[in-house]
Image (cartoon, coloured by chain):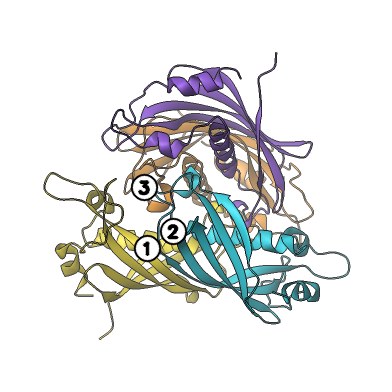
Chain colours: A orange, B yellow, C cyan, D purple
Amino acid sequence: MTAARFEHALRVYWEDTDAGGVVFYANYLKYFERARTEWLRGLGFSQEAMRLQDGLQDGVMFVVSSTSVRYLSPARLDDLLQISVEPRELGRASMLLFQQAWRGERLLAEGEIRIGCVASGALADFKPTRIPAALIKAIKPF
Amino acid sequence: MTAARFEHALRVYWEDTDAGGVVFYANYLKYFERARTEWLRGLGFSQEAMRLQDGLQDGVMFVVSSTSVRYLSPARLDDLLQISVEPRELGRASMLLFQQAWRGERLLAEGEIRIGCVASGALADFKPTRIPAALIKAIKPF
Amino acid sequence: MTAARFEHALRVYWEDTDAGGVVFYANYLKYFERARTEWLRGLGFSQEAMRLQDGLQDGVMFVVSSTSVRYLSPARLDDLLQISVEPRELGRASMLLFQQAWRGERLLAEGEIRIGCVASGALADFKPTRIPAALIKAIKPF
Amino acid sequence: MTAARFEHALRVYWEDTDAGGVVFYANYLKYFERARTEWLRGLGFSQEAMRLQDGLQDGVMFVVSSTSVRYLSPARLDDLLQISVEPRELGRASMLLFQQAWRGERLLAEGEIRIGCVASGALADFKPTRIPAALIKAIKPF
């Protein structure tokens, strides 16, 4: 059984490029994050809602703890990219995702992003905490 | 007769926010530009294709010559925004566009963006040049 | 008597440029803000300290309410820029600053930035509030 | 014998933070690059000058081919950071650099950045090319 794969399409704009005429490499981290956000949204989870505390319990927030990216081929202004998300490991307070950026049949960049779940709020100071059970349950089938 | 109006939808991601918990104001200029790019694309014009020179003639590029923006209400993570484009003046080498950012019925930001057409290419050095006739023709009905 | 003028020097890096080979215009708003931050720091005010609430009173935060910028000449990778700050109006809850970006003797961009003072904190929701008296006093001589 | 180590100081501004109240992780790639640029400048090499072609030979440009970063502790608005650069491998057309971000005695992020040297120019299309001999010679003592 292969892991399920989520895809998010996005367009390259002027803001994304640099004087080399191509997408500035740091921006692939932004593209990967947009795809993760849409993946979570597709599973029914809004990060802004998760982050805010309600009367009963503290909010949680995801923080990136490591990124490892290989840049294979440049993207240019106006390119339409497909950004993928594939969960590779799912722990109690962290997960590892494999992500790729494609333009048509061409792989442009790929990498592993490790994400930790922390308590949100001014006083919480990024204390690691469990990923909400409902989210674990939603990701598991992947 | 009111001017025609183009709209582009976009989502607010982590990359767009700042420590105030809302969208960093400079990013509305990026949002406005994405909408202008999609507006041009909708009219049949790719900026990357326009920028590149071909055998017969030099390429052209749009540069922003002034921006005037009022920030009325903050946008937050996960918000879905509508960004509008309305041409207000159309000259031979420049145009003035009125743009707004909305979240549902709430106006978040608005402003005027003046854009000039310049010759592209390493040697061209941003020399003002005429907006391609085909583009003028496509915008005029607005 | 001319108004006093603060200057902050900064360097143009790859991250600041776009595929046109020059500084992406929206980044002048970032440059202007860095200069305002250093201007406040020079007057003895750290925004992070001001933002955080202490036991006695709520924190305050500055938000940009409007920006009006003219882009006159492009900056390029490796350029060393001088960014100026000149207070033009100082009200109880807002101020207007005139700012310029220079490379040597050449003026690259200039504009007016209006800033409002708001209560900080998750519940404060950007309610306008008075600029701290000590800061008003520090700016006045300008 | 330990490798020589270059350090560049920079300040955290509003533009660098996100709604979590800390520096957006992708921005450490920008910080690392600013330090590399200052390191090259300190060795006598301006990237903008290297990129531009002269009558005798084509220009060269550095492109990032991979980044691997661990984010250990968050930086906040107004923090003063020290960003280090240490060459770890120096090949004919690429090099590997180890970089860290410190706030005082606290390590915030660290990683390896692999950089390739390519021909610059519109037609060059990122063809790998040798690192200029003079630059190799300047780095070697490290």
Q: Earlier in the sequence, mark 2 or mark 3?
A: 3
Do tags 2 and 3 sit on the same chain? yes
Q: Residue at x 63, y 69 (%)?
A: C63
- Find out whether the residues at labels 1 and 2 contact each other: C-beta distance under 8 Å: yes
Spatial CA distance of label 3 from label 1 is: 14 Å
- Find out whether the residues at labels 3 and 1 contact each other: C-beta distance under 8 Å: no
Asked if residue D73 lies left or right of residue A25, the reply is right
Residue under mark 3: which chain is it in? C
Amino acid carrying mark 3 in the image: Ala
Asked if residue D65 lies left or right of residue A89, the reply is left
Amino acid carrying mark 2 in the image: Tyr
Q: With respect to residue D82, does B130 lie above or below?
A: below
Amino acid carrying mark 1 in the image: Val
Q: Circle 2 sits on which residue?
A: C25
Furthest residue in direction top, as rendered: D1
Front in this rendered view, residue A62 or A58: A62
Spatial CA distance of label 1 from label 2 is: 7 Å
